[in-house]
Amino acid sequence: MPMKRGAAEGVLNIVRFNWPFFAWAAAAATALLVIGLVAQSWLAMAALIGLVLLLLGIMTPLLVSFYVYDLSGLYELSFLKGLTPHKVMNLTAGFDETTKILRTKFPEAEIVSCDFYDGEAHSEPSIRRARNLFPLSEDTLSISTAEIPLPDGDADLILGFLSLHEVRDEKERARFLTEIKRTLAPGGSIFILEHLRDVPNFLAYSIGFLHFHSRQTWHQAFANSDLTISKEECLTPFLRLFKLTRP
């Protein structure tokens, strides 16, 4: 059985890795509350309205994240059910939540954790904090988006679990996907799970949805890398799963 995660582990990680934002938001909320209580007339009303909007802006993405990461059963990796891989390549970007789960799910398979995080190219502050709090295991293989030091056709299952969106440059993304395809064994599958830059994620994360790529961007990246989409489905309204194969 897959490893059991702690209660609210997903949403707590979001707060841990983005604590400066939440600290500033708490300070702003406190200031607005004080103004709303001590000011007169329109200023008090404006401050209280601002407080309500601020709290909505903070609580909505946290509640959605709690649903997606903690209530939906996402980390059971049920989309991999029925597979019996011999070698799994798990692609991570500075924070690895899934390798231990994969080793429990596929005890007979060789699981290789490949981390492509580049502190200069992928400069997301939350990833740096995640890496400091949860260092990668010693057996993690450090790779780049230009080169994966594994033989051709080495893995029959490749997983990109909420990680590949960190590759922001279009050409780098296509190059990385081409390199991933090189390591995929004939008849193997690549699973890429991502939030999309779409209406549901905008309603959930407001301008934070710009950190994700659109469905069209992913389709174009797969086409540029000569990868075939054999299956595409929604895992919750906020996540899209792409199953890819070699032509």
Image: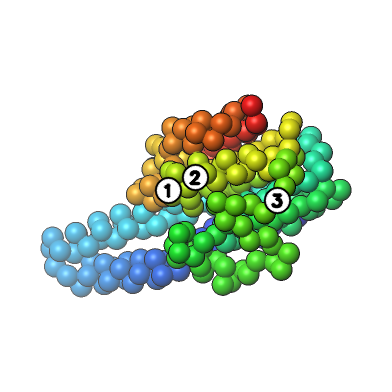
User: Measuring 30% from the left and 68% from the top, which residue is drawn there?
Assistant: 28
Q: Which mark is residue 109?
A: none
Type of amino acid at the residue the image marks with label 2:
Arg
Q: Nearer the viewer, residue 72 or 179?
A: 179
Sequence order check, earlier mark of 3 and 2: 3
Asked if marks 1 and 2 touch (Cβ < 8 Å), the reply is yes
Task: Kindly indicate the quadrant of the structure image that contains residue 170.
Answer: top left
Residue designated by label 2: 173
Instruction: Kindly report the distance in space between the C-alpha atoms of the residues bearing marks 3 and 2.
Output: 19 Å
Relative image position of residue 222 (x, y in whole percent)? 53, 34
SS for callout 1? loop
Residue designated by label 1: 169
Type of amino acid at the residue the image marks with label 3:
Leu
Q: Nearer the viewer, residue 118 or 133?
A: 118
SS for callout 3? loop
Q: Residues within 10 Å of mark 1 (few under 14, many from 20)?
A: few
Instruction: Kindly report the distance in space between the C-alpha atoms of the residues bearing marks 1 and 3.
Output: 23 Å
Circle 3 or circle 2, nearest the eye: 3
SS for callout 2? helix
User: Measuring 55% from the left and 59% from the top, which residue is drawn there?
Assistant: 117
Relative image position of residue 4 (x, y in whole percent)? 73, 55
Type of amino acid at the residue the image marks with label 1:
Asp
Sequence order check, earlier mark of 1 and 3: 3
User: Measuring 45% from the left and 64% from the top, which residue is drawn there?
Assistant: 120
Task: Kindly indicate the quadrant of the structure image that contains residue 9.
Answer: bottom right
Residue designated by label 3: 150
Asked if marks 1 and 3 touch (Cβ < 8 Å), the reply is no
Tell me if I can see residue 235 in this picture.
no
User: Measuring 54% from the left and 35% from the top, which residue is drawn there?
Assistant: 225
